[in-house]
Image: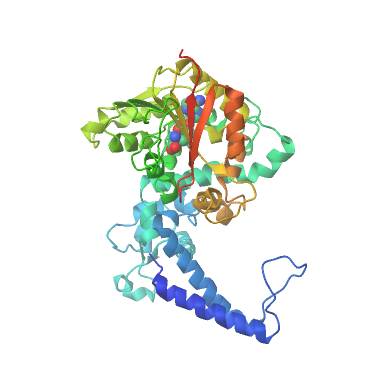
Amino acid sequence: MSASKSFGELGSVIKSSTTSIEDILTALNLSHLSNYPDGATYQYPTALQEHRQRLLEALEELQVLTLGPTEYLFPTFHVLYHYNIASHVPENGESISYEKLAQRCGLPEAELRRIMRAAMSLRVFELGDEEESPGNGPGRGGVRHNAVSHALRTTLAHDAVGFALEEYGPAALQYAESLRRFPASVQPDETALALANGSASMGDDIFSAIAGQPARTERVANAMSWVMTLPENSSNHFVGNVPWSPSLPLQRTDSAGHATTCPRVVVDVGGSHGDLSRALLRRYREIECVICEDLPEVTKRNLERGVEDEDESISSRLKYREYNFFTEQVVHGADVYVFRTVLHDWPDKQAIQILRTQVPALKPGARILVNDMCIEEGSSSQASGEAQLRRQSQFITILTHFSHPATSATDLMVKMSMNARERTREEWYHLFAEADPRFHIQSIISPPLAVHSIIEVVWQGAGA
Ligand SMILES: C[S@@+](CC[C@H](N)C(=O)[O-])C[C@H]1O[C@@H](n2cnc3c(N)ncnc32)[C@H](O)[C@@H]1O
C-alpha cells in the first residue's frame, strides 16, 4: 500500500510537527486555539502551514496504516466500483498500461487517467513501473495494485463498497427529504431508502423491495459477510462469549443451578450466508446442527452455492432453510435461536412481532441470543462499543467522501433504511418485556473491542 513509512516514523513526524505548531502558536500568543467552541472562527497563521501540511499527510498515512487495506476501502468512489477497475488490474504487483486498462474497462483512456489520478491521491492503486513505457515521461508507465486496491478486487469487499454506494448513497441524499415527508415515522417503508427506491409508503421495506432482484440480494449478503471480516465485527467475539463458552471467566449456570451446557440445535435466524453458523460449528463440535434461516432468495443462493469447499464435518451439520421471521418460527424445540444484527434493522413494532413469532416454537429454558449493539447514551469513551462502531462504520463514510456527508454511524444507517435505531440496554429490556413478559434477560455481555453485545434471553414460559 502507498503508506511508505512505519508506525514509528510516522509517530516521529507527528510529534515534531505538533511541537513546531505548538511553538509557533505560543510565540504568536495563539496557544488557546482548540476544537472547543469559543465563539471564534480562526485561520491558522501562514507560519505554520508547512508543519500543518506535514502533519496532515502523516496523519492520513497513519490512518491508512492503522486501518489496514480492508478497512481502508471507503475512499473508493462510484466510478471505480461501477467499472470494476480493480478487477482489471493484474495481480502479483504487475503494472498495466493506461491504454490496456482503459480497453479492459471500456473507458476512454483520458478519462481512465483522470479517475486513476484521483484514486491514487486517495491511496487506492499506485503508479506502475516507469520503464514499461519509457517514452511517456515520469509516472506514465501505467498503474498497479497497492494493498487497498488489491483488497477491493475481492467480491466481498467490492460488493460491500457497491452496497454502500448504490444502496445507501442515493438514500443519504433522500435523508433530509424523508424527515420532511415522514416526520417521526416508525414505518419501515417511510424512509430515505424507500424514497430512493421509489417505494415509499407502498408497504415495502428494503428487504422486500429488492427481493426479486438476485444481484442486489446477493450483494447485500456479500456485504454482510464482508462486515464480519472487520476485527470489531468478527464472529469470534460472539463465538467466544456465548453463555456455554469455556473461555468465559466464570462458569455459567442456568436458573436451576446447572452448568450451562453447549446446545445441540441452534437456529441462526436471518443468518444470511451462514458465516456465524459455520463459526459456531467450527468452534463447538458438540453442536449437532445449526439451521441458518433467511428469505427465499438468500436461501436459494446458499443452497446453490453448495458446500464444495466446506469441511465435511461442518457442511453435514449445517442446514439452510427458508423462513420469513414475520411468520411463526418453523423450527420448534431448538436450544438456541440467534439473531445477529437482525433486530437492529427493525423499529420496535416489527422487532416485537419478530420475537413473538418465535414464541410458539420455544421450549422451556430455550435461549434467544441477540448479537447487536448496546449503545450508551451520551458516551464518547473510546472504549465503548459505540465509539468502536463509529470507526467501524467507515463503511458508510464512503458517502461522506463522494456522495453526501450523511453519517458515520450505523444508527443513522438503520434509520435511513428502516426507520429503526440502535438500542440502549434499557431499550433492549423494554423491547423484550413488551414482546412477552416470559422473556427473561439473563445477561448482557459486551466483549472488549467488539461492536456488538450478546444479549442472552431465556424463555421462562411453558413449552409450546
Ligand atoms: C443485517 S443482515 C444480518 C445477517 C447476518 N445475521 C449477519 O450478522 O451477517 C439481516 C438479515 O435478515 C434477513 N431478513 C430480512 N428480512 C427477513 C425476513 N422477513 N425473514 C427472514 N430473514 C430476513 C436479510 O436477508 C439479512 O440476511
Identify the residue at image location x=41%, y=76%.
Answer: 9
Residue 60 is situated, as x and y percent measured from the top left of the image, at 50, 67
Q: Quadrant of residue 281?
A: top left
Q: Quadrant of residue 410?
A: top right
Q: Quadrant of residue 145?
A: bottom left
- Left or right, 179 with respect to 81, comes to right
Residue lying farthest front? 257
Asked whether residue 341 appears in the rendered view, the answer is no
- Of residues 256 and 265, the one nearer the viewer is 256
Q: How many marks?
A: 0
Image color mode = rainbow
Identify the residue at image location x=39%, y=47%.
Answer: 229
Residue 449 is situated, as x and y percent measured from the top left of the image, at 46, 51
Vertical order, 78 against 52 (above or below): above
Residue lying farthest left? 312
- Left or right, 16 with respect to 150, comes to right
Identify the residue at image location x=39%, y=24%.
Answer: 335
Identify the residue at image location x=72%, y=73%.
Answer: 42
Residue lying farthest top? 464
Asked whether residue 167 appears in the rendered view, the answer is yes
Residue 260 is situated, as x and y percent measured from the top left of the image, at 37, 31
Residue 232 is situated, as x and y percent measured from the top left of the image, at 44, 49
Q: Quadrant of the N terminus?
A: bottom left
Vertical order, 239 against 17 (above or below): above
Vertical order, 236 against 455 (above or below): below
